[in-house]
Image: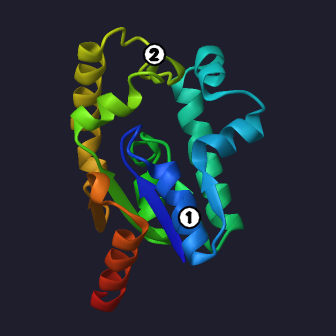
Amino acid sequence: MRLYLIGMPGAGKTTLGRALAVAYELPFRDLDQEIVRREQRSVADIFAAEGEAYFRQREATVLRDLVAELPDLVLATGGGTPCFHQNAEVLLETGTTLYLHVPVEELVRRLQRGAATRPLLAETSSSEALEKRLRETLAAREQFYSRAPLRCSGSSCTVAAVQRLLEQYRTSS
């Protein structure tokens, strides 16, 4: 089984993904962390030195590498992963994709302290600016996120809730 978690920064993809990997006894990978490991530098450093286009190309390559390497996997993607280089198609064709939908107000609360470490949010100096950026980003990404066959919302998205969703999805497919 391959399970891909998509959604905005701060949605909880990594936290939930780790827990799901334990529950299903599957390998877990965080796509951004895998890129950092392979590049031997932080996402912020990659963005600063090479730009977003380079990062997105690298992200697409690492995604495809992981799919080729691991037939069983829980993968927490980066927030923008499904939006570039036909990555959404890779996710949809090679596993089950779950969209973690979290209201923007909650994302602001979760990201307020750490926004400076995230390249696409680093220039948001206030909670109002952060909220505006998140709303704009979500509006642009929703068309990709909404393609996921499974959706889980907010704090109700627990391991047990995802297990129920997956069971329902498997029996209806």
Of residues 77 and 163, the one nearer the viewer is 163
Q: Residue furthest bottom?
A: 171
What numbered label is drawn on residue 122?
A: 2
* Crowding at mark 1 (Cα within 10 Å: few <14, some 14-19, many 20+): many
Residue found 62% across the figure and 39% down from its top: 58
The percent coordinates of residue 113 (x first, y second) are: 44, 21
Q: Residues within 10 Å of mark 2 (few under 14, many from 20)?
A: few
**Which residue does the image show at 52% across and 28% down from the upper left?**
53
Mark 2–mark 1 Cα distance, whole angstroms, equals: 28 Å
Q: Is residue 102 above or below residue 172?
A: above
Residue type for callout 1: Val
Q: Residue at x 60, y 22 (%)?
A: 44
Within the image, what quadrant is residue 166 found in? bottom left
Q: Which quarter shows the N terminus?
A: bottom right
Q: Is residue 94 left or right of residue 140?
A: right
> Position of 131 compared to 68: left or right?
left
Instruction: Decide: is 101 above or below 122.
Output: below
Say what secondary structure mark 1 lies in: strand
The residue carrying mark 1 is 74
| Residue 173: x %, y % from top left | 31, 87
Q: 67 above or below 108?
A: below
- Relative placement, left or right, of 171 versus 23 is left
Tag 2's secondary structure?
loop
Q: Nearer the viewer, residue 30 or 39?
A: 30
Quick check: 46 left or right of 77? Answer: right
Name the amino acid type tagged 2.
Answer: Ala
The residue located at (41%, 38%) in the rendering is: 10
Q: On the image, which quarter does residue 164 sit in?
A: bottom left
